Amino acid sequence: MRLSRFFLLVFFFSSSLLANNPKISIITSLYKGETFIEGFMQDIVQQTIFDQCELIIINANSPENEEPFIRPYLEKYPNIFYFELEKDPGLYAVWNIAIELARGEFITNANVDDRLSHVCYETYLKNLEEHPKIDLVYSNPVHTHTPNETFENNTAVKVFNRAEFAPNSMKDCLPGPNPMWRKKLHEKHGMFDESFKHSGDWEMWCRAVAGGARFLKVPGTFCLYFYNPQGLSTSRKIAFKAAWEDGRIRRTYGFLWKD
């Protein structure tokens, strides 16, 4: 199993849950998340259909002490799974590990520094089930520069208005910070490219669209996105590396948005 590559150290689970496959697998990469993890755990379990979800948290050898905040939830919720890795293989490698573990028909990533509307997953699931030919759904996020606010109580003043889906709209990372997609999308279009460290989600979605995948923008706003100055895609320290990756994507998939 691929997990052996990363020396799995800790695995908490409830065997009683294994017979009941969830609808949605929520995948979370955890690294330097101590500031956010308590609010994240409180937020995620308030999803209206959390009982139809599994939450897979993979600690990518974080140097911080997040586990004490997670453990009470592991004891209370049998659909929360927690893994620790001996080394950090990178965000997209962590997502790939989580996807391989996932038992849900649908996948969504949850970032520890973002917060969601309580009906986010219910709304996304409804749209995917009503549109069987759609592979991925997304919506407009709102941006905040203040950490650990909630979706219901925040200082956000900007809605990031994402375009309606079309191949030529993929010049931006259209799905944004919290899409939900069918797990079988990876059977046809492959996994996240682990050579990317910052823009691998954009590359994955472009590759899928180039292969015929269809996305759908869901009306409304369901994600409070924290513009984290230390974030993997927002830190100035990695701007040059991120720009190089973005250029690589434009060279490969620019035909999607060129006339």
Image (cartoon, helix red, strand yellow):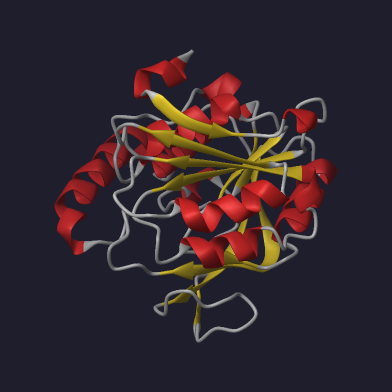
Please name the residue shown 31% across and 39% down the image.
Answer: 249
Q: Is residue 26 left or right of residue 64?
A: right
Q: Residue 139: x and y, percent?
A: 62, 60
Q: Looking at the image, which is closer to me, 96 or 140? A: 96
Q: Quadrant of residue 7?
A: top left
- Residue 63 lies, in percent from the top left, at 29, 49
Residue 203, compared with residue 68, is above or below; it is above
Which residue occupies the foreground of this view, 191 or 101?
Answer: 101
Q: Is residue 87 left or right of residue 256?
A: left
For the C terminus, which image quadrant? top left
Residue shown at 70%/65% (left/top)? 219
The quarter of the displayed image where residue 132 is located: top right
Residue 162 visible, this orientation: no
Q: Residue at x 58, y 27 (%)?
A: 101
Percent position of residue 59, x then y: 42, 42
Q: Is residue 192 above or below residue 64?
A: above
Is any part of residue 31 visible from this angle? yes
Against 111, residue 22 (above or below) is above
Tell me if 59 is positioned left or right of 121 in this view: left
Number of numbered callouts drawn: 0
Residue 187 drawn at (x, y percent): 59, 20
Front residue of 149 and 236: 149
